[in-house]
Image (cartoon, helix red, strand yellow):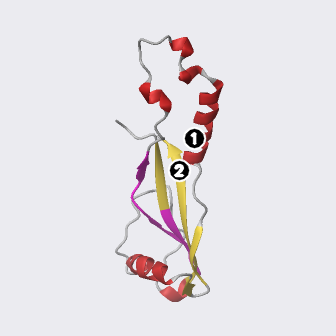
């Protein structure tokens, strides 16, 4: 069965020569299972929970919740990582970009400049997009 939506997480690296991106692999998302999963085809469809206003409101809220991206997280600012765990996790990724070992295979995010050293970095923010399939 296919997924219901996709989550695309990426690092947006603002530096003195522009913006560079590091895009993580796409994550597949699935809507929550509901009471309707137990629908019995022998029941009268008009009495089904699928047709109730309660279900429609629940479903709309669930989709809104699932497709709302998390708030961006600043992981590097003022020449420092904001947390030690961010430095351990993301410094190797930034070095990949600096050493040109990373190739952005997702054209949705295009670099506007070339990052060549850590001193050029102004801010790194982790962001995400969510979209229906």
Q: Is residue 96 left or right of residue 120?
A: left
Identify the disc placed on residue 62. Answer: 1
Q: Nearer the viewer, mark 1 or mark 2?
A: 1
Q: Which sits in the foreground, 54 or 8?
A: 54
Secondary structure mostly seen in the magenta stretch: strand
Looking at the image, which residue is at 56% across and 81% down?
Answer: 82
Q: Is residue 75 left or right of residue 97?
A: right
Depicted 22 relative to depicted 32: above or below: below
25 is within the stretch colored magenta: yes
| Other residues around mark 2 within 10 Å, as few (<14) / some (14–19) / many (≥20) | some
Residue 110: x and y, percent? 50, 62
Q: What secondary structure is found at the residue carrying circle 1?
A: helix
Depicted 119 relative to depicted 63: above or below: below
Depicted 111 relative to depicted 91: above or below: above
Looking at the image, which residue is at 63% across and 29% down?
Answer: 54
Q: What secondary structure is found at the residue carrying circle 2?
A: strand
Q: Which residues are magenta?
A: 10-29
Residue 47: x and y, percent? 55, 15
Residue 53: x and y, percent? 65, 25
Looking at the image, which residue is at 46% across and 37% down?
Answer: 33
Q: Which sits in the foreground, 69 or 21?
A: 69
| Other residues around mark 1 within 10 Å, as few (<14) / some (14–19) / many (≥20) | some
- Gap in Å between the C-alphas at discs 1 and 2? 14 Å
Q: Which residue is mark 2?
A: 130
Query: On the rendered image, what quadrant is the N terminus found in?
Result: top left
Depicted 99 relative to depicted 33: above or below: below
């Amino acid at each position: 069965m296919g997924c219901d939506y996709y989550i695309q997480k990426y690092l947006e690296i603002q530096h003195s020569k522009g913006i560079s991106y590091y895009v993580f692999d796409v994550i597949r998302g699935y809507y929550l299972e509901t009471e309707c999963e137990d629908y019995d085809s022998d029941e009268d469809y008009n009495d089904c929970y699928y047709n109730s206003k309660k279900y429609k409101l629940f479903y709309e809220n669930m989709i809104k919740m699932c497709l709302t991206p998390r708030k961006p997280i600043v992981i590097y600012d003022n020449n420092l990582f904001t947390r030690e765990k961010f430095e351990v996790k993301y410094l190797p990724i930034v070095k990949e970009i600096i050493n040109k070992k990373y190739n952005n295979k997702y054209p949705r995010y295009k670099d506007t400049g070339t990052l060549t050293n850590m001193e050029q970095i102004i801010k790194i923010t982790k962001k995400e997009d969510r979209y229906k399939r």
